[in-house]
Amino acid sequence: MHLYNDYELIYLVQNENCEEAFKKLLGKYKLMIYKNIYQYNPDKFYFDDYLQEGLMLMNKAINIFEERRGKTFTRFFELILKRKIFELNRKKPLYEIYDDFEMFPDKEQSIEEIDTEHLTKFENIVFNKYFVENQNISYIAEVENKSVKQIYNAIYRIKNKI
């Protein structure tokens, strides 16, 4: 069996659409794809997506690689793979949406259950106006003759005490 180097395999794929050469390149660089994916610690939920993107990128890299540019295929592919994984990490959602409505009880129900006895008089007023009546912070500050910062601080203390 004849061993081909990367340049010969890439030539065969680019010019003759040799599927066997593509499979050999894929087999050789699949471990590099895995290594680079694991390097960025993706969630297990996204791992298959990253792998699929890496394999598609491998196909694209083989087709656009030009030897005359002075880079080896390994370095070229590794560079664009790292950039793609970084881009995927940047674009993944920062939050998840759940269908389980029991995880998030009604606001009114949870507010009734909160014990406000340990809050100060001012914190109690802010609690009722902000959390129960859903009033705007600037409006509360104006009505209570306090600064907006004092209202924010009171809300912060309330959240910590609750």
Image: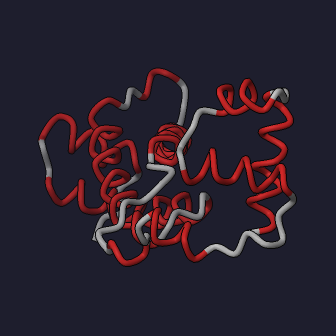
Disc count in the image?
0
Q: Residue at x 30, y 49 (%)?
A: 9
Look at the image and tell me whether residue 74 can be seen: no
Residue 91 lies, in percent from the top left, at 45, 41
Q: Residue at x 78, y 32 (%)?
A: 144
Look at the image and tell me whether residue 88 can be seen: yes
Residue 135 lies, in percent from the top left, at 57, 38
Name the image quarter holding the N terminus: bottom left
Q: Nearer the viewer, residue 59 or 108?
A: 108
Q: Nearer the viewer, residue 15 or 30?
A: 30
Residue 21 lies, in percent from the top left, at 23, 55
Depicted 99 relative to depicted 26: above or below:
below
Q: Residue at x 70, y 75 (%)?
A: 115
Image quadrant where residue 10 sits:
top left
Name the image quarter holding the C terminus: bottom right
147 displayed left or right of 60: right
Image quadrant where residue 48 sits:
bottom left
Q: Nearer the viewer, residue 21 or 133?
A: 133
Residue 148 lies, in percent from the top left, at 79, 28
Q: Residue at x 27, y 39 (%)?
A: 11
Depicted 127 relative to depicted 112: above or below:
above
